[in-house]
Amino acid sequence: MHDPQNARAMQAYWKTNVRYMTVLLAIWATVSYLCGIVFVRELNTVHLGGFPLGFWFAQQGSIYVFILLILVYFLLMDRLDKRFDVHE
C-alpha cells in the first residue's frame, strides 16, 4: 500500500522542484529590481538600440529574462521528471 521508498523519492522530487522555482524566481526578481531600479543610472550610460540600457531592462529586459527562465525551468523539469521516472 504505502511504499516508503517511493514517498522519499517523491519528497526529493518536490524538494528539487521547489529549489528550482526559488532560484529561478530569485534571478528574475533580482534582474527586474536591480537592473530596472537600483542600477538604472549606471546602466543608462550604455545604450541598446538607441535606448538607455536601464530603461530597456525596466521595460523589456525583465520580460525577456522571465521568458528565458521559463525555458530553463522547462528543461530542468524535463530532466528531473526523467530522473524520477514521472515523465509522460
Image (cartoon, rainbow, N blue to C red):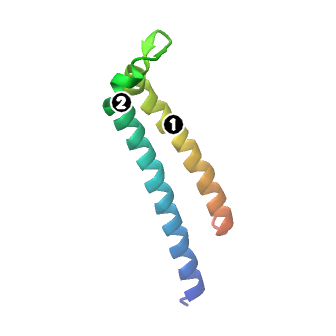
- Quarter of the image where the N terminus is located: bottom right
Tell me where residue 34 sits by quadrant. top left
| 20 is higher (above) or lower (below) than 1 | above
Tell me, yes or no, if residue 88 can be seen here. Answer: no
The residue located at (53%, 65%) in the rendering is 16
Give amino acid for label 2.
Phe
The residue located at (41%, 49%) in the rendering is 26
Camera-nearest residue between 45 and 1: 45
**Pointer 2 or 1: first along the chain:** 2
Residue lying furthest top in this view?
A: 50
Mark linked to residue 39: 2
Q: Which residue is mark 1?
A: 67
| 56 is higher (above) or lower (below) than 66 | above
User: Residue 73, percent across and down?
Assistant: 55, 49
Q: Is residue 32 left or right of residue 15?
A: left
User: Residue 57, percent across and down?
Assistant: 42, 26
| 10 is higher (above) or lower (below) than 38 | below
Q: Is residue 35 left or right of residue 15?
A: left
Camera-nearest residue between 12 and 28: 28
Say which of marks 2 and 1 sits in front: 2
Say what secondary structure mark 2 lies in: loop
Give amino acid for label 1.
Ile
The residue located at (39%, 32%) in the rendering is 35
